[in-house]
Amino acid sequence: MYLRQREGWIEVITGPMFAGKTEELIRRVKRLEYARQNILVFKPSIDTRYADNEIVSHNNNRTKSINIRKASEIMQYVDNETNVVAIDEIQFLDEEAVDICEYLADHGIRVIVSGLDRNFRGEPFSFMPRLLAIAEEVTKLSAICVVCHTPATRTQRIVNGKPASYNDPIILVGAKDTYEARCRHCHQVPGKPVTYTQFDDHE
């Protein structure tokens, strides 16, 4: 596919759940719509929490979107008139999403994506570190910890009222019934391996 050469770059909006990532993505999309930019908005089809053909923030702001099962489907919709590609919850797509974002930016398209930087274990989420590394702009948002009310940078998964085990599956789509925002000190992952041996004896 040939695309006209224009300025292009990648913007990533990231952070834990309930930090306002989708809200910020929608805000940028709305501004670009006002500027009469040709915008394509995508979301993974696995995300059916609020609407089928819209991305919806937790504050119920929304904009029309195209459902895709895998990242390569984006290229079926992009043409020479496309100025901007926006993708919500990009961490739910396959790793080819990184290469496609890079390709689009290299060919003059502004790419704006939002996604979790960490999974419920507190570990980097899939290909997100690669995406953050190649982005021209990264906006890292924080939420409010539900336990101590300090800035939250992690996502706590709750199962039957208790913190989810480390061995639970990585992907489980949910909202306030399944997840909470937590700070580093209030985040709990039972069964998580210790990766560093602390030296408490300073003799």
Image (spheres, rainbow, N blue to C red):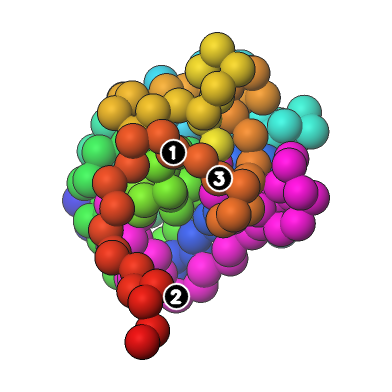
Q: Which residue is mark 2?
A: 136
Spatial CA span between label 2 and label 3: 30 Å
Classify residue 182 as left or right of residue 27. Answer: left
The verdict on residue 197 being magenta is: no
Closer to viewer: mark 2 or mark 3: 3
Region of the chain picked out in magenta, as a range: 126-155
**Where residue 187 is drawn, which disc sits there?**
3
Q: Residue at x 66, y 29 (%)?
A: 56
Q: Residue furthest bottom?
A: 203
CB within 8 Å, label 3 to label 1: yes
Q: Amino acid at mark 2?
A: Glu
Q: Residue at x 67, y 24 (%)?
A: 176
The verdict on residue 148 being magenta is: yes
Q: Which residue is mark 1?
A: 189
Q: Amino acid at mark 3?
A: His
Query: Looking at the figure, which quarter contains the C terminus?
Result: bottom left
In this view of the protein, which residue sits in the foreground, 141 or 168? 168
Closer to the chain start, of discs 1 and 2, is 2
User: Is 174 located above or below residue 84 in the figure?
Assistant: above
